[in-house]
Amino acid sequence: MARKIFIAATSQNCGKTTTSLSLMHMARKKYPRVGFIKPIGPKPVLYRGLSADKDAVVMARVFGLEDDLRLMSPFVLQPGDTRRVLDGKIDRGLIAERMLEAIEELDAKNDFLIIEGAGHPGVGSLLGCNNARLAAESGAAVMLVTGGGLGNVVDSVCMNLALFEKEQVDVRAVLVNKIIPDKRERTLDYLERAFADHALKLIGGFNYQPILANPTLRRIAGVLDIELHADEEEAQRIVHHVQLGAASAQRVAGLLQDSTLVIVNSSRDELIVTLANLYQIPEWRTKLAGIIIPGTGEVSAISQQIIETSGIPYMRAGRTSTRVFEIIKEDVSKLTAEDTHKIALISELAEKRFDFEAIDALFDQETRSPGRPTTSNDTEHL
């Protein structure tokens, strides 16, 4: 039987997958067999002919677990499935059975098993197996991941704890991510006091870092569903700023910040040429990540030649400048297996940020039982 930890979150985009990836990385240094499962897959992708959740595919590819992908993503929610459940065309009992059988099989073949929930703890209720119920049925204790802040963290944790308490699930830790770096110690101190009466451990997670939160050029190309003209190294570059190139060439250049992606119309030859030339100068290359040329208008032959000669990463998008800007700003960057720079950084930061031995001991199945008060050993600093 594996040491099981259920990674839940108070809401979407709190850093569940980043947390799971960190724990996978550290657990594999201690345990010979480490597994992962995302029972409910709300983001289906096709990988090697198998429909699986996107996060499960990332974990499988990063850690070489492709042979277990069928178990790692036992139920993938397809468009219209919720209606089919309510119409009685999909049996809720069979859904739960499929998930629990996959957990049981991975439990038997691993020494450490990470179970990642979907969205907030209530996700899956319509299917008859929300995060809290899955944690209860699998016998896994919970680490509840939150975003940053103070009042928001306390409010969201207390609200979500109610569902776990209803299912009699042991929530052993709250991991706080996206902490403002210069407020880290003060924030964690206040949160320790706020949760003093709760039988759970507060763990300081990752600080808010643009390098983790912002998209790569490859991610932007994927979101826009367009081709990226760049080599592998450039494709992984993280974009920290997006700028509409509406002003003069001199003004746009003056507004460039660290790793800026510029949206520039095809008719702006002077701006395209200026940016392409700036990209070849080392001190400007740190500011300029690349360009997107929106619309369907042709770029002049000489401008196109200068773009290609300069080596500046570029994309053509058949949308307006405003729409391209909106799509990029609305997107929340998610990890992909190709984001090797980000994944390496997450692994490096995890080793500095987390005491895995303390976390591992906290989730020992024999350490605590549901409802048991926290002991002095439980409250040691992680």
Image (spheres, rainbow, N blue to C red):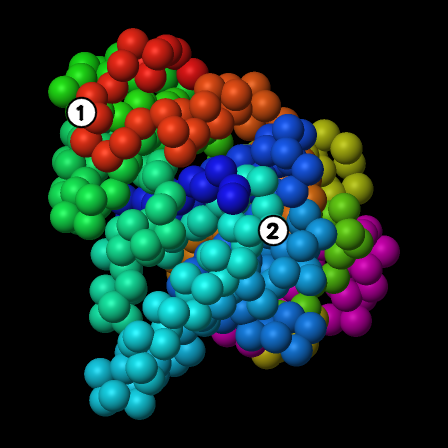
Give the total of numbered labels. 2
Question: Toward the viewer: 309 or 149?
Answer: 149
Left or right, 42 with respect to 333, comes to left
Residue in view at x 53 percent, y 35 percent: 23
Can residue 144 be seen here? The reply is yes
* The C terminus, quarter of image: top left
Question: Toward the viewer: 321 or 315?
Answer: 315
The alpha-carbon separation of the residues under discs 1 and 2 comes to 34 Å
Q: Residue 330 at x, y = what percent?
A: 39, 57
Span of residues in magenta? 300-323
Residue in view at x 38 percent, y 80 percent: 79
Q: Within 10 Å of the Cα at label 1, are there few (<14), some (14-19), or many (20+) other Cα atoms? A: some
Residue linked to disc 2: 109
Q: What residue type is labelled 1?
A: His
Residue linked to disc 1: 198
Q: What residue type is labelled 2?
A: Lys
Q: In the displayed structure, would residue 72 be above or below residue 280?
A: below
Residue in view at x 31 percent, y 23 percent: 202
Q: What element carries label 1?
A: loop
Question: Which one is closest to the eye, mark 1 or mark 2?
Answer: 2
Instruction: Give the residue at the far right of this rendering.
Output: 309
Q: In the displayed structure, would residue 321 be above or below residue 92?
A: above
Q: Residue 287 at x, y = what percent?
A: 63, 36
Can residue 251 be seen here? The reply is no
Q: Is there a contact, CB below 8 Å, between mark 1 and mark 2?
A: no
Q: In the displayed structure, would residue 284 be above or below residue 44?
A: above
Left or right, 160 with respect to 28, comes to left
Q: In the displayed structure, would residue 65 be above or below residue 378?
A: below
